[in-house]
Image: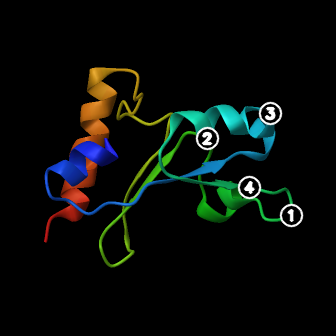
Amino acid sequence: MRLELEGDGHKVHFLTINATSATAYQQELLDKQPFSMFQDQLTVNVWTLLGGYKDDFFIYDKAGKLKVYLPVTGSVNTNLSTDTGYNNLKAYILTALAP
């Protein structure tokens, strides 16, 4: 999606925060994604700091302000393995990029 958005002229940055419970899957994630990944630590607990959970999406605008929070258990399908989830996430990102 990042490459698709950039191909359409949008400057975007994606990053993943790997859950402390998923360190065994870290390399698999790195092999599948072309963007930055940060490893959460028990001493930091980023998900608690953000008020979210593993597989949630936080979309920020150009100024760094949170525009939308999409929890994995929310009413919006964000499953990137489906066309609906992919298109939903892309639409929210495009909304955040709008002036």
> Against 82, is 94 above or below?
below
Using the image, tell me which numbered label, if any, was put on residue 43.
1
- Residue 67 on image: x %, y %: 33, 63
Which label's residue is closer to the chain start, 4 or 3? 3
Which residue type carries mark 3?
Answer: Ala
Using the image, tell me which numbered label, if any, was put on residue 40.
4
Which residue type carries mark 2?
Answer: Leu
Using the image, tell me which numbered label, if any, was put on residue 80.
none
- Residue 90 on image: x %, y %: 26, 43
Q: Nearer the viewer, mark 4 or mark 3?
A: 3
Using the image, tell me which numbered label, if any, was put on residue 24.
3
> Against 75, is 3 above or below?
below
Tell me, yes or no, whether the two marked residues, 2 and 4, touch with CB atoms within 8 Å: no
Marks 4 and 3 sit apart, C-alpha to C-alpha, by: 13 Å
Marks 2 and 1 sit apart, C-alpha to C-alpha, by: 22 Å
Tell me, yes or no, whether the two marked residues, 3 and 2, touch with CB atoms within 8 Å: no
Pick the front one: 85 or 18: 18
Mark 1 Cα shell of 10 Å, populated few (<14), some (14-19), many (≥20): few
Which label's residue is closer to the chain start, 3 or 1? 3
Identify which residue is drawn at 29% across, 73% down: 62
Rendering colour mode? rainbow
* Residue receiving disc 2: 30
Q: Nearer the viewer, mark 3 or mark 1?
A: 3
Which residue type carries mark 1?
Answer: Thr
Identify which residue is drawn at 42% across, 28% down: 79
